Image: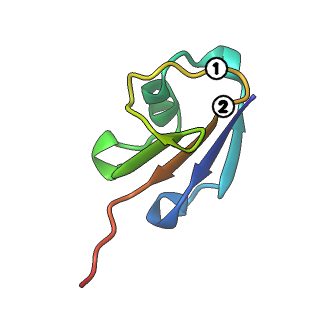
Amino acid sequence: MIEVRLFATLRLGREKIIYLDSSQFSTAGEVLNHLTIDPEEVAIFLINGKHSHLSAHIKDGDIIAIFPPVGGG
């Protein structure tokens, strides 16, 4: 099982925390595709609390946190 935590605008129309079957995904980018999140919508991508990239391999038990760019000023 993979736990995906979405933040801010990425939660719109989605759950805050999503659990996915780890056997269905091999890379972080595949998770984004499954959730229909455009990579350009992602500013920070963490796997188990560490900055990562979309080509990173994921495994059972991983926790993925996805943050969009923050606007304002």
Where is residue 16, by image quadrant? bottom right
**Which residue: 48% across, 58% down?**
10
Q: Along the line of sight, which residue is nearer the eye, 45 or 14?
A: 45
Q: Mark 1: which secondary structure? A: loop
Q: Amino acid at mark 2?
A: Asp
**Which residue: 52% across, 31% down?**
31
Q: Amino acid at mark 1?
A: Lys
- Residue 45, x across and y down, in percent: 43, 44
Q: Which mark is residue 62?
A: 2
In the displayed structure, 71 sits above or below 62; it is: below
Where is residue 56, by image quadrant? top left
Q: State the CA–CA distance, disc 2 to disc 1.
A: 6 Å
| Residue designated by label 1 | 59
**Which residue: 50% across, 40% down?**
50
Q: Mark 2: which secondary structure? A: loop
Q: Which mark is residue 13?
A: none
Is residue 73 found left or right of 1 in the rendered image? left
Is residue 31 found left or right of 5 in the rendered image? left
- Residue 67, x across and y down, in percent: 44, 55
Task: Assess disc 1: are there few (<14), some (14-19) or many (≥20) residues with their C-alpha within 10 Å of its C-alpha.
Answer: some
Question: Answer yes or no: do the residues labelled 2 and 1 have beta carbons within 8 Å?
Answer: yes
In the displayed structure, 63 sits above or below 42; it is: above
- Residue 55, x across and y down, in percent: 38, 22
Where is the C terminus found, in terms of image quarters? Answer: bottom left
Task: Assess disc 2: are there few (<14), some (14-19) or many (≥20) residues with their C-alpha within 10 Å of its C-alpha.
Answer: some
**Which residue: 32% across, 61% down?**
69
Is residue 64 found left or right of 45 in the rendered image? right
Is residue 73 found left or right of 28 in the rendered image? left
Q: Single out the residue that lies furthest toward the left.
A: 73
Where is the N terminus found, in terms of image quarters? Answer: top right
